[in-house]
Image (tube, helix red, strand yellow):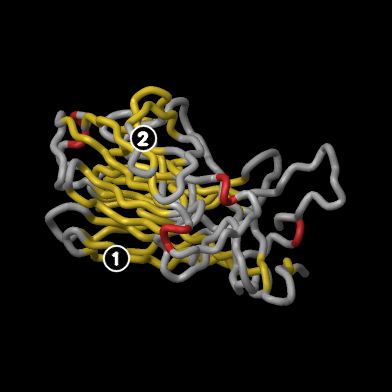
Amino acid sequence: MVETGRNRIPFFASAGKTRFIEGNRNHRPESPSQSCVQGGPVRASLSIIAVVCLVSGLCAAPVETIDLASSSAWTVSIDGGGSQTVAVPGNTRMSDNAVFRRGITIPASAAGNVVKVLFGAVDYGCDVYLGTTLITSHKNLMIPFEADLTGKVTAGGSYTLEVRAYSRSHYGNQIPNGCWWASLATGINRYVKLVVLPQIYVKDVYIQPSVTHDRLDFDVWVHNASAQAKTLTVNGSLAAWGASTWTYPSIPAASATIAANGIAKVRMSAPWDLGPQSYWWPNIPFQETYTAVLHNLLLSVKEGAATLDTIIKRFGFAEWGEGPYYTRRHK
């Protein structure tokens, strides 16, 4: 079980924007985030992350999501060869590099908002260009990342998105293979989405359950992409997932003043006295009727009475410790 990164799919509900977070995490600087790790154990409290949907569909104005996956819109040139149509996502075998291209059109909802391309994984690394402009570089295996197009595109404009993917040997075989099958997953092998986010939004959440201290801690990163400093309040609450019912603790709100185009981390916490029945337990020994015990964390960002963004994150209450192997702590 790993805590994922800050990539997300936009959602919308009522007056604010409700979204859920997918993928993993690569931008969180203070916590490990690997789906396959080669080497020694890592000490961390890790939480289960899963997708939570509130309404059908992925977006509604003003937040919008465009799926860039396609079996016909992308072309690829492998190791300097000729261009050919390719399905994205997919596994593209290469000796050194593969250059993917497709056209994108920026939706009208992008005016005054944040525009990003979210990648589920490009292995073993890549450079992302908008036309001839380098937007971002990424180097890691099976890790989500983002390319921020804000300020570089205009609503209604058409552009060429280019992804120059590289093999493990391109990096001198310095990137750990991790899982045995990792060498088969090369190129753009997970989702690619163009997303429009509000000017103020939750950029990332890191949940840290502690069985040792009967406590739920979590960090919330809020991005203020507007041109003015903002004083914002983050509110949190807990709700049951599935058929179980719990009497959850309240979570004190937290406030922060965020500079224009700045990011602030807000630390929030609550006691956890729900007992072992509220913990996540693995399905060992296997049971056909097994249902994981999970919980929903609901977060909203407000400026005064106005709700600017809302997300829901699902997690399991479990703590992992360091040793010869990963061990799950319990009481």
* Residue at image mark 1: 256
Q: How crowded is the residue under tag 1: few (<14 C-alpha within 10 Å), some, or many (20+)?
A: some
Q: In the rendered image, which quarter contains the C terminus? A: bottom right
48 with respect to 187 (left or right): right
Q: In the rendered image, which quarter contains the N terminus? A: bottom right
Marks 1 and 2: CB-CB under 8 Å? no
Image quadrant in which you'd find residue 70: top left
Residue 76 is marked as 2
Report the residue that reaches farthest toward the top. 72
Which residue shows up at 35% across the image and 66% down it? 265
Residue 94 lies, in percent from the top left, at: 46, 45
60 or 96, which lies in front?
96
Query: Taking 141 as reference, is 9 above or below it?
Result: above
Amino acid at the residue labelled 1: Ala
Image quadrant in which you'd find residue 105: top left
Query: Taking 90 as reference, is 323 above or below it?
Result: below
Residue 61 lies, in percent from the top left, at: 28, 29
Q: How crowded is the residue under tag 2: few (<14 C-alpha within 10 Å), some, or many (20+)?
A: many
The answer for how far apart the CA atoms under marks 1 and 2 are is 45 Å
23 with respect to 36 (left or right): left
Q: Is residue 99 visible?
A: yes
**Dot 1 or dot 2, earlier in sequence:** 2
Residue 178 lies, in percent from the top left, at: 60, 59
Amino acid at the residue labelled 2: Val
- The local secondary structure at tag 1 comes to strand
Residue 202 lies, in percent from the top left, at: 35, 52
Which residue shows up at 49% across the image and 42% down it? 93
Residue 68 is marked as none
